[in-house]
Amino acid sequence: MPLPRRDAWLTAERVERTTCDCSLCVKKNAVMTKVPEDALEVLQGEDLLALYEWNTHRAKHYFCRRCGIYVFHRKRAALDHFRVNVFCLDDFDPETLPLRETEGANMTVVDPKPRAEWPGPRTPGVSG
């Protein structure tokens, strides 16, 4: 299988597509690909990005102020990675990557058995 194409602004190889069943992702019909933080560079239009945050304000969701397209986000549980909307990648066929469904609808702010790599809150009432 050939390696997925690289874009000037996204220098990571794409391994898979992911979906999430949380209310935000379902409503925006998000299909994302994960990239390391240093593999994403906004080359132009950064001033047009709008930021959406809620709850602990750890997750950062970016939209275009001009057209409303959901571009990318930083998850609260993986602060060293971004998830990029695969439909924002020019000349890229998302169907070339396998799709993995993830569960977000039942994700809580506090996990009784958090993984070490999750930097989120550890006790009720303490936000990150």
Image (spheres, rainbow, N blue to C red):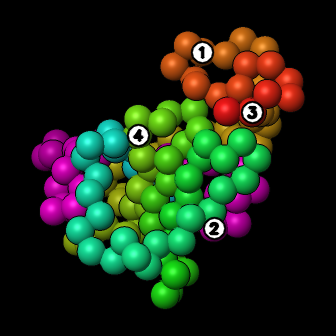
User: How far apart, in angstroms, are the residues tagged by discs 4 and 1?
Assistant: 16 Å
- Local crowd size for mark 4, using a 10 Å CA cut-off: few (<14), some (14–19), many (≥20): some
Which numbered disc, 2 or 1, marks the residue that appears first in the sequence? Answer: 2
Which amino acid lies under the numbered mark 4 shown in the image of this protein? Answer: His
Where does label 2 land, which residue? Answer: 28
Where does label 3 land, which residue? Answer: 127
- Quadrant including the C terminus: top right
Where does label 1 land, which residue? Answer: 115
Where does label 4 land, which residue? Answer: 81
Q: Say which quarter of the image contains residue 46.
A: bottom left
Which numbered disc, 3 or 1, marks the residue that appears first in the sequence? Answer: 1
Q: Which residues are magenta?
A: 1-29
Mark 3 vs mark 1, foreground winner is: 3
Left or right, 95 with reference to 127: left
User: How far apart, in angstroms, are the residues tagged by discs 2 and 3?
Assistant: 26 Å
Label 1 near label 4: C-beta < 8 Å? no
Mark 4 vs mark 3, foreground winner is: 3
Residue sitting at 29 percent across and 52 percent down?
40
Q: Position of residue 85 (x, y in %)?
A: 44, 61
Q: Secondary structure at mark 4?
A: strand
Which amino acid lies under the numbered mark 3 shown in the image of this protein? Answer: Ser
Which amino acid lies under the numbered mark 1 shown in the image of this protein? Answer: Arg
**83 is higher (above) or lower (below) than 24:** above
Residue sitting at 15 percent across and 62 percent down?
8
User: How far apart, in angstroms, are the residues tagged by discs 2 and 1?
Assistant: 28 Å
